[in-house]
Amino acid sequence: MLSLPITFEAVIIPLLLSLKVAGLATVIATILGVFMAWCAAKYDFWGKEILDAVLTLPVVLPPTVLGYYLLVLLGRRGPIGAWLEAHFDINLIFTWQGAVIAASIVAFPLVYKSSRSSFEGVSRQFEDASRVLGKTELQVFCMITLPLAFRGILAGAMLAFARALGEFGATLMVAGSLPGRTQTLSIAVYEAVQAGHDQIANFLVIVTSIVCIAVLLASNYFLRPKYRLG
Amino acid sequence: MRIDIDVHQFFRSGGHEFKLGIKFKCDEDITVLFGQSGSGKSLLLKTIAGLQTPKSGKILINNRILFDSSIDINVPSRRRNVGYLFQDYALFPHLSVAENIGFSRRSLFSKALGKDDFDRVQELLNVFQIEDLKNKYPADISGGQRQRVGLARALLQEPEILLLDEPFSALDPLLRITMRQELKKIQRIFEIPILLITHDPQDVAELGQRLVLIKQGSVTGSVDLSKEPFRDSSGKPVRPEIKKILLSAAGVLNE
């Protein structure tokens, strides 16, 4: 069987691309996820639980179905894609930016769910106490709610990063597998196996595993309790 | 008049209706609101602090209007300048004792306080004899110590009144005796009016100068306990056995 040498192009480039895509996707998913979770935890409005179900959908839908939705929405003839092309001359399909969007959506529910239960776990009494102590709503959020919910949010963000790093189906449908441009680590593994490049496949698999283990170890380290709640 | 309250609110939850209609005035150093659980005492305290908005009425503390529905005034919680001690003290678990006490004066971005505020925190740590706890976290100190921290935190912002929500219910009986004496001392040192709610007759007997009785959301009596024989709000002496009743039977008192 043919085996190619492990080159810079074959390993480092997909790795860097994966880290870039997963990192940006985590930032986007965390900002949106925390915001939506805070709204869901604080306000009651009609259709809240329906919205919650829709926001959680990406975690249960098959990634290919999600990828198909994205293609329909973001494609040249899709409502968002056509608008972006007409006004900004932007095309997201088969670009790494498209991969970021796919990974963000797949990772979003992990941050959202985890943040929402953290926010709901912050006792209202702490927020009331700081209001009486003269704090504005923004100060209450930044000084009490956010620090008390921080561990849950961080745990969600870490899982989101790991999920985004492993994202395959939706990314492949939206961004394709263009070596050096949209071929992320997980897609490169698939391509290497398909092409029979076992040596590269082995190496990529090991690199991916090490990165994922490092993320999980880091999250455990950051999530050590610093104070007791009891 | 230090406290002048007349508030009305209506609650409905799960088929139950609850009407709160509380009106009283008082001028004593320590006023005790006495009533059973579910009589609306806690709701009233939250309403005074601005954490609940009544449907109508007025709230005046030291002649300052905090709420008046007739002229559309509703001062937000953060500007009411009331000290509030929650039932389980609500100390912030992620902040140390000193950071908890200094909380009302700290800015959004830094835990550090200005020189004057830092000195005030030190002073309060000394007054409450909790200097050696200042770097500990709330989970690592005892119930009585937590109460001292809660009081110190409320007093740092120099409030116009202290609202205490069943302050001794979380403490063991022996500690209650000590903390009641401490509270009296604190009242004298800081010269601040105290409004305390309780369902423990012992609190009334040892602390109360004015007793306001609450039952099912309304005031059923107001008694001046400062001079014998006790007089009710219309100036008539109350029955001599009332003190006995106060001491013995919380359940019977409101009948």
Image (cartoon, coloured by chain):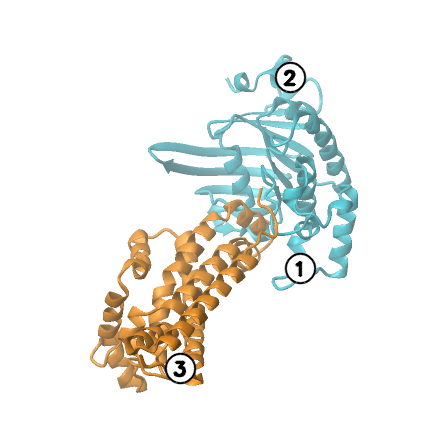
Chain colours: A orange, B cyan
Disc 3 target residue: A10
Q: Which mark is residue B243?
A: 2
Q: Which amino acid is tagged 1?
A: Lys
Disc 1 target residue: B111
Mark 3–mark 2 distance (CA, rounded to whole Å): 89 Å
- Say few, some or many: other residues with alpha carbon within 10 Å of mark 2 (under 14 / 14 to 19 / 20 or more): some
Q: Nearer the viewer, mark 3 or mark 1?
A: 3
Q: Which mark is residue B20?
A: none
Residue A82 position, x and y percent, is 24, 81
Up the image or down, B106 lies above or below B130; here it is below
Mark 2–mark 1 distance (CA, rounded to whole Å): 48 Å
Quarter of the image for residue A92 reads: bottom left
Q: Residue at x 32, y 83 (%)?
A: A178
Q: Is residue A154 left or right of residue B190?
A: left
Mark 2 and mark 1 on one chain: yes
Q: Considering depth in this image, is B116 or A112 the residue closer to the camera?
A: A112
Residue B127 position, x and y percent, is 78, 43
Q: Which amino acid is tagged 2?
A: Lys
Quarter of the image for residue B240 reads: top right
Mark 3 in CB contact with mark 2 (< 8 angstroms):
no
Q: Considering depth in this image, is A192 or A45 the residue closer to the camera?
A: A192
Mark 3–mark 1 distance (CA, rounded to whole Å): 49 Å
Q: Which amino acid is tagged 3?
A: Ala
Up the image or down, A169 lies above or below A57; here it is below
